[in-house]
Amino acid sequence: MILLDGKATAATIRTEIKEELDKLTGKYGRQPGLAVVLVGEDPASQVYVRNKERACEDCGIKSMPHKLDNTTQLELEGLIQKLNRDVNVDGILVQLPLPEGLDSQKILDLIDPEKDVDGFHPVNVGKMSLGLPGFKPCTPAGVINLLKRYNLDPACKKAVVIGRSNIVGKPLAMMLSQSGPCANATVTLCHSRTADLKAECLEADFVFAAIGTPNFVTADMVKEGAVVIDVGINRTDEGLAGDCDFESLKDKVHAITPVPGGVGPMTIAQLMVNTLEAFRLHVGA
Ligand code: GUN
């Protein structure tokens, strides 16, 4: 069984970015800037944002935090517009979910698509669906990058994605089914209304779990030798748990990601990749 080590792979990617930026920041006279907007006190979001700030520091990206205890829709919209105009800001990330009462879609729609390093703006979602270059959401792009680094190509294989969220499931299904490197899969997108989820999973060479239910995918649901990618991070009384039952799966699969240390670090590494790309776009490198 191959343990897909997202933590080590993400560290390698951060080192590559740092080396690249050591050259670019001298040449262009400034570092890439990533504005990270966090509203409210959601403990999970606070951890994610801290990890994103650390990753920036690690690879030579200037993290520009905007932490707001309390804000109005209008004030937050004003902040986004200010960041859009700021020439030292290459990427803008609004940590989701926003507290109740704020219209997330309206906020995301305001971000300049050229600074949308999360790939959530409708222009970037549209570009992705057309197969055009643009920013891609960090979690699905990080998953594909992890597969690439382990030479696990889903081309011509059957893939099942469980979960149809806009952040993970939907874009991941799109990316896997497109033509291009580490894609070309035959994809089934499953969700809470799928009639026979187990039967769908048993057909799959690649299973991607993004459901948000701890240990949901068990060994009886996957075929021998499948590749299992666990996108879940669930806080349980026993600590962090993924969407996949690692213990039962590990002796049946060809490869699997652990939780923690699998997809999570790859999401953050991808954010650094996207921020570097935004910087290149803005300085014309
Ligand atoms: N909340 C959960 N995942 C994400 C993500 O990838 N980006 C942002 N901004 N918020 C999230």
Image (cartoon, grey):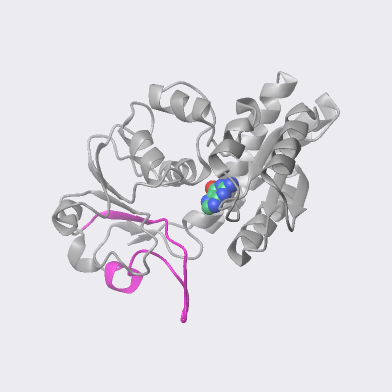
What span is colored magenta in the figure?
225-250
- Left or right: 223 as drawn, with respect to 132: left
Q: How many marks?
A: 0
Task: Return the residue found at the far top.
Answer: 284
Q: Compared with residue 53, is residue 41 higher up or lower down, i.e. above or below? A: below
Is 269 magenta? The answer is no
Residue 195 seen in the figure: yes
Residue 266 seen in the figure: no
Q: How far across and down, in percent of the image, does residue 269 sit? A: 59, 47
Is 229 magenta? The answer is yes
Image point 42% across, 46% down: which residue?
168
- Left or right: 14 as drawn, with respect to 217: right
**In the rendered image, which quarter is residue 50 located in?**
bottom right
Image point 18% across, 67% down: which residue?
220
Q: From the image, which quarter does the C terminus lie in?
A: top right
- Seen from the viewer's position, the closer of residues 190 and 41 is 41
Image point 33% across, 26% down: which residue?
179
Q: How far across and down, in percent of the image, does residue 16 sit? A: 64, 41
Q: From the image, which quarter does the N terminus lie in?
A: bottom left
- Seen from the viewer's position, the closer of residues 158 and 200 is 200
Q: How far across and down, in percent of the image, does residue 26 sit? A: 84, 30
**In the rendered image, which quarter is residue 17 located in?**
top right
Task: Return the residue found at the far bottom.
Answer: 237
Q: How far across and down, in percent of the image, does residue 99 sit? A: 60, 56
